[in-house]
Image (tube, helix red, strand yellow):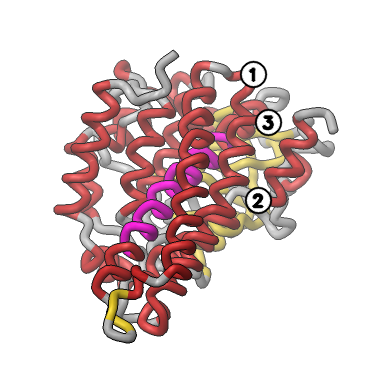
Amino acid sequence: MDFGLSEEQELLQRSARDFLAQECPTAFVRESAKTSDGFSRAFHDKLAVMGWTGLVIPEAFGGLGLGMLDLAVLSEEMGRTVTPGAFFSSTLAAITLTQSKASALKKAWLPKLADGLVVGSLAFLEESERLDADGITLKCQKTRQGYRLSGTKLFVQDAEVAEFFIVAARTNGRGEAGLIVLLVPRDTPGIKIEPLLNLDLTRKTYEVTFDAVTVQAGNLVADEGKAWKLLSRVLDAAAVILAADGLGGAQRALELSVEYSKVRQQFGRPIGSFQAVKHIAAEMASEIEPARSLVWYAAYAYDAEPRHAARAAAMAKARMSDVYSRTANRAVQIHGGIGFTWEHDMHLWFKRAKWNELAFGDASYHRERLAVLDGL
């Protein structure tokens, strides 16, 4: 049994690391954080040239047609460089459309997503912050022309630059019944977008309000009875992608800490020579490596073992939520006072770790989810 990456995946890993080292230094990350939308069209276009915006989009729609493990490899490298921009949110929108049965919408939007011409975003979370079916309460009234949406979605990523939203809404009932998924163009009358404060400066989130927004019937992504199955797969994908991002971030935080401990002098010797610092670094490494196996298995299972995909995604996200957060905390400790300053780059990974920890379910949520999946 081969537990390693394929030659193609290793090539993707190397090319991604080289590209991001050149195009996404921390100076670029900081400049992006200063902008209102955190989005660089020029950088997004470069991702498109690399084929990454269409990585998991089928070849029939202009993408590369690769799988979740390939996406996890790329996401890990993006986590290493705390890559800003709309790649994550747009990829989730692409995954939703790709796995739907909405042929006309796929034909209309997937080629544009693959070419990086448009950005999409998932509008799921609401005031309750629940990630189950009952958390979706945004009202959807059926009309002669299609649907009318009324309500608010929170923490919608990159809403300011998205050309469309994938919106989870409720026509009636509770639980999985009555849920639908719609594609709503951002310029539809009645949509109001307000920025939200966010700890992670590389990720911009928004409150999106739908005030009697009319949506055409042809914009239905998933109808009642099928919507939750699709949304569940998308949430699993989000968990795996964030776990991979956290894996790369944790590894880089460890590397920065080791590098710093070799040059920082105290009492006439490098701090890395002190046993306490060595033990902290060893604990960081001993948590990261086992977590890597969970992340790569979750990515593999997403495509190859659908029956086990949800369980694997929950384990990977729960573990990396803890590991990345603890690693970032320890990295700041090793850096000492300078690690808390704006001038040092360490805070970029620290804040990303905190965002990743909570986004799409924290460790406690996914452990509880794992227990339910295992029938406990």
- The residue that appears at 37% across and 43% down in the rendered structure is 76
Range covered by the magenta-colored residues:
236-256
Residue 48 percent across, percent down from the top left: 22, 39
Real-space CA distance between mark 3 and mark 2, rounded to the nearest whole angstrom: 22 Å
The number of numbered discs placed on residues in the rendered structure image is: 3
* Main SS of residues in magenta: helix
Taking the magenta stretch, the answer to whether it contains residue 96 is no
Q: Are marks 1 and 2 in contact (CB under 8 Å)?
A: no
Horizontal and vertical percent for residue 81? 30, 55
Give the CA separation, mark 3 to mark 1.
Answer: 16 Å
| Amino acid, disc 3 | Trp
* Nearest to N terminus: mark 3 or mark 2: 3
Q: Which mark is residue 307?
A: 1
Q: Find disc 2 in the rendering and name its residue.
A: 363
Q: Which mark is residue 228?
A: 3
Which of marks 2 and 1 precedes in the sequence?
1
N-terminal of the pair, mark 3 or mark 1, is 3
Query: Callout 3: 10 Å neighbours few (<14), some, many (20+)?
Result: many
- Outermost residue, top direction? 1
Neighbour tally class for label 1: few under 14, some 14-19, many 20 plus, Cα within 10 Å = few
Helix, strand or loop at label 1? It is helix
Q: What x and y, as percent, mark residue 105?
A: 44, 27
